[in-house]
Amino acid sequence: MSIRELFKKKSKEENTTMPSAKGKSDVPEGIMTKCPECKHVILTKDLMKNCKVCPECQHHYKMTAHERIEQLLDAESFTSMDDHLITENPLDFPSYTEKIKADAAATGLNEAVLTGVGKIQGRPVAIAVMDAHFRMGSMGSVVGEKITRTVEKATELGIPMLIFSASGGARMQEGVLSLMQMAKVSVALKRHSNKGLLYVSIMTYPTTGGVSASFASVGDINLAEPKALIGFAGRRVIEQTVREKLPEDFQTAEFLLSHGQVDAVVHRNDMVDVMSKIIQLHAGKETELA
């Protein structure tokens, strides 16, 4: 055995048997979570109870679509829609089908958005929640179709439409078919608006590309979570184009609020109450115009 192999073996044994620096065994993986912003360590179960928000610096972790539904809607009020729609591979893109299947197995979703109808403090809503854990929340043909069908259901029922965006933009593996979804969803939202119905867009981390350039930005009320990344192109591309150094907080929810592109930045723990008040205030108008 060489000297190098001997030291490798010894190092491996130390890593598996030695206690931590404080003389205690390492904490099992998953029990504790370290905040990526302030480095504060918190019990994972406490983090989940706090809606995945760091209690020290208020950093908002990414949520899955199912977590968002559970946090926002009344218990057992949600009925999902169009879970049978499955993405195909229209451009025969290499490994695309396999990646879709892998993400579906990992997230429990059929695509990067969960759609359906439910209630917020007793008031009915239609809702679409994008999930960045599925192909980075990218918008393909099934994502656009699911959101469009949900908007049409909201129009049919005469109820508000909520869309939580979390997306890297249009899905390149589907080419122009993904870009067409921008117009399709926007037209459905226009028909919903023509009926005097409410559409609230909530932008979360990240909301970029074709999603930010279409339905995420055309809400009757546009909200965002704290420090959410919101924009079309990336910082580097924009800086190279305009040949200027951009502000440090550029493309954050707070920056967009100060420039009038969002109406409010809402803490996740306040989202239920804020949404309930908005829906309640608009309910009279909907009834009047129905």
Image (tube, rainbow, N blue to C red):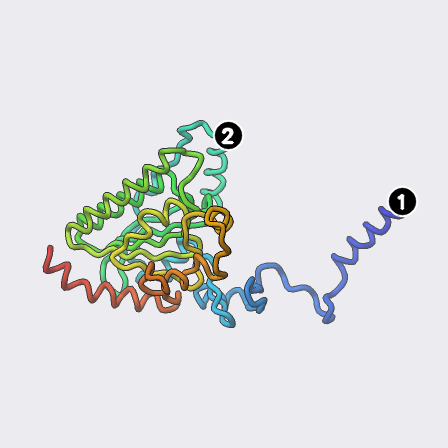
Q: In the rendered structure, find residue 122 and report the number of the disc placed on it.
A: none
Q: Which residue carries the number 2 mark? A: 94
Q: In the rendered structure, find residue 2 and report the number of the disc placed on it.
A: 1
Mark in the foreground, 1 or 2: 2
Q: Look at the image and tell me in which quarter the N terminus lies.
A: top right
Q: Is residue 10 left or right of residue 106?
A: right
Q: Which of 108 and 238 is in front in this view?
A: 238
The picture places residue 267, in percent across and down from the top left corner, at 39, 67
In the orientation shown, which residue stands out farthest toward the top?
92
The amino acid beneath tag 1 is Ser
Give the secondary structure at mark 1: loop
Q: Is residue 153 left or right of residue 235?
A: left
The amino acid beneath tag 2 is Pro
Q: Is residue 32 above or below residue 86?
A: below
Q: Which of 51 and 206 is in front in this view?
A: 206
Residue 2 appearing in the image: yes
The picture places residue 154, in percent across and down from the top left corner, at 22, 50
In the orientation shown, which residue stands out farthest toward the front?
243
Q: Residues within 10 Å of mark 1 (few under 14, many from 20)?
A: few
Q: Look at the image and tell me in which quarter the C terminus lies.
A: bottom left
Residue 133 appearing in the image: no
Q: In this view, does 145 lie above or below 275?
A: above
Give the secondary structure at mark 2: loop
Q: In this view, does 194 lie above or below 272?
A: above
The picture places residue 18, in percent across and down from the top left corner, at 76, 62
Seen at 30% across and 45% down, the residue is 147
Q: Nearer the viewer, residue 241 or 180?
A: 241
Q: Is residue 110 above or below residue 267?
A: above
Q: Is residue 160 left or right of residue 170?
A: left
Q: Residues within 10 Å of mark 2 (few under 14, many from 20)?
A: few
Seen at 49% across and 71% down, the residue is 55
